[in-house]
Image (spheres, rainbow, N blue to C red):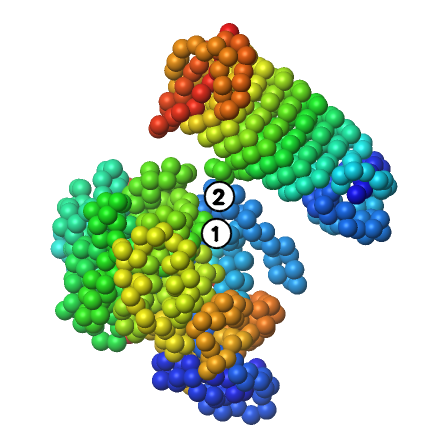
Amino acid sequence: MRELILKLKEKPDLCLEVEGILPNVIVEKDVGEIENLPIQYGNRKVKLSEFFDISVEKSETPRVVFEGDMSRVKRIGWKLDGGEIIVRGNAGMYLGAFMSNGRIIVEGDVGHFSALNMSGGEMIIKGNAGDYLCASYRGDWRGMSGGTVIVKGNVGKELGSYMRGGKIVVEGIADDFAGVSMKGGLMVINKAKSRPGAGMTAGSIVVNDVDELLPGFFEEGEEENPEIEGEKFEGRFKVFSGDHAERKAKGKIYLRI
Amino acid sequence: MKLILKNGIVYDPANGINGEKMDICIKDGKIVEKVRFAKEIDVSGKLVMPAGFDIHSHIAGGKVNVGRLFRPEDSLRRLVARKNGLRSGSGYSVPSVHLIGYDYARMGYTTVITPAMPPLLARHTHHELNEIPMIDKAAFPLYDGNWFVMKYISEEKFDELKAYVAWLLWATKGYSVKVVNPGGTEAWGWRKNVHDLDDEVPYFGVTPREIITSLVDACNDLNLPHSVHLHCNCLGEPGNYEITIKTLQLVRHKDFDGRQSLYVTHLQFHSYGGDSWKTFESKADEVAKEVNKNDNVIIDTGNIVFGDTTTMTADAPMEYDLHLLTGLKWVNKDVELETAPGVTPYIYSPKVLVNAVQWAVGIELALLIKPEKVILTTDSPNGGIFTNYPKVIAWLMSKKAREDMLAIVHRSTEHRTVLPTIDKEYDFYEIAMITRTNPAKAAGMPNKGHLGVGADADIAVYDINPLEFNPKDYEKLEKALSNAYLTIKGGEILVREGEIVKVTHGRTFWVDAMSKVDRSLIEKDLDYYFKRYYSVSLSNYVIGENELRRSERVCVS
């Protein structure tokens, strides 16, 4: 097993798209082949070595490490199906989109549409995340179905829209419309701005503080140390059901008192 | 360019050629008796047929574009990069404009008709058709919810109706009269629908029965090449086979020399029994019986193929019901005085009994109705995208293919249908009929769909030996039909071994019947309606012939 270290030479003028640079892909290739892997730069294909310094080291698991400010590098870990990706810095849009297995760790901030339609694996973001984290692809009504995403910082709007399964933990603030049209899964948010769970029909949102709840949520009483989606939570929670603007809505919001 | 296709195994039902080894000579885009000093292509042991003709496939127009716009996730499912001079594109169930042309050519199809063009959106439709490469095309304008049509019918002004029918064909550069859920789309404006042939349309007071028979008479009187192209009432509702049979009976005695009087489209969606989704069953046998008895009707099947697709019809109330059923996103549109289309995604799942029955009904219809009255379609993309035709053909040609599918679908399917008891298997002659000869004949295009002398040199060659074909080996058939060995259109080779080698732009056919009517009869009404109700003026509504890339005017005699 080995680890591929990609150091960005300089911040590109246009966005790079590194679709296909995955741990399981590079494992069987020698350095020469890796240098020639195609990536997209604007509207043309370029070699990986044109923008990155490449080095290879031994490691326990197949791993790709990106070093430098990757905020203009899109599609890191697109369709990741195993292995590990570590980003030492910020990451661009579509980080870990459609990933089904493996692990992504980002030490900085990530762009919009990260963990889009995720179906498995793990993602840890130590900084902030953009809008549409864990959301469904534009237009799709079948969103994230599995996996875990942990964000230490804040997240943007429409976190986990159309989510069907899996778990999202936000330790900072989630912007408006977290869990919009949610149909399953668990979302744990420290603080949500207005209207979390708009149009949700199933699944649970656990939140310590919220700016504003929609009138579609009805108060159902209080619970002590509840078990939510198979997980134990400590403390007292106010329980809301909704969003009753939808037919047969069975979603739950747990608000910590 | 001169060409000879040597030693192919030819199926040409229009000329009674059934699997004969023969040469086909091509000169100046036409098929000729003999040709000298021509380029020879050896196609020995290969299947040679006239090029495919798809008479009912939604390939252009407002709905199709809406389908593209509101399904970005469908675009993501299929991305095609620019390659070998071909344009890039995307879209699985609603491919982008150029892909449609490429996909049809790869399957050996060279003529496609888009069957539902709202007259007000005709300009858009034609501009889209202009851009679709490879194929010849035509469009059927919609007449079902049209205020002029209903006004003239309710006032019993038949000459005015005829004049309007001809005028609208001329104004929109359309090919024939399409009728969708007659009366229903106008009733939808009042949040209603029609459920019987004698239900009245609000305000106009006409019934679906009157609309259908009047338009059939008008089409026959005008001697249009294609008849009324009808999408019956109550599409997709359990128990709708009764209204379908009643509709078919309307034209039992309306004989017309040379063609059918009524073309009923996607019959599969109209052949259901039962009174709810729980008792949903196939009534394909009853409907097939009526079609076989009735000499004035031709049908297309509208098979479904399992998978994710985008449904789009000019039948808005039906699309709304479907949206309520699935809870998925939905688009509705009201086209001023004319019609009301809708679009919604749908997933046909083999594990859902209703879908499994629908799948069986489509195949039953094709097997139970005489092959000379059947046309193969999937009502693309409503039943499934047109690239699935080879799959449907495999089901028709191979009992084993059907049995393999029956093993996968919902267990109760065999109790709700008669499919497991049918042993018939289509042969290549009959397949050539239902995908080539019949549609060309029904559409009234005498130069298409056959390989007789004088026909357009539109030919498809597939890399499969029909004389050695074993129905059990249906996967090979599917593969061969999906990638034509040769597609020749107008004497030019467009596809070679599944790869496109030349990009051309086909003609757009339209019918001019103005010589048979007196336009002055409707002049006053046109002025009044356009001034008072339409959002465009009359002069901007009419499409000039110069707006078509390659116009092919068909004059009615």
Q: Write down the residue under mark 2.
A: B71
Query: Is B544 drawn above or below residue B373 in the view shown?
Result: above
Tell me where residue B320 sits by quadrant: top left
Label 1 neighbour load within 10 Å: few <14, some 14-19, many 20+:
many
Q: Write down the residue under mark 1.
A: B94
Tell me where residue B212 sits by quadrant: bottom left
Task: Tell me where residue B456 appears, x and y as whole percent.
Answer: 45, 78
* Callout 1: chain: B
Task: Tell me where residue B436 appears, x and y as whole percent.
Answer: 40, 73
The residue that appears at 30% across and 45% down in the rendered structure is B318
The residue that appears at 27% across and 62% down in the rendered structure is B418
Image quarter of the N terminus of chain B: bottom right
The residue that appears at 54% across and 76% down in the rendered structure is B463
Query: Is A45 drawn above or below residue A67 in the view shown?
Result: below
**Element carrying mark 2:** loop
Tell me whether the residue at label 2 lies in contact with that at label 1, contact meaning CB atoms closer than 8 angstroms.
yes
Q: Which three-letter amino acid code belongs to the residue tagged 1?
A: Val
* Callout 2: chain: B
Residue closest to the eye, B436 or B522: B436
Residue A218 in sight from this viewpoint? yes
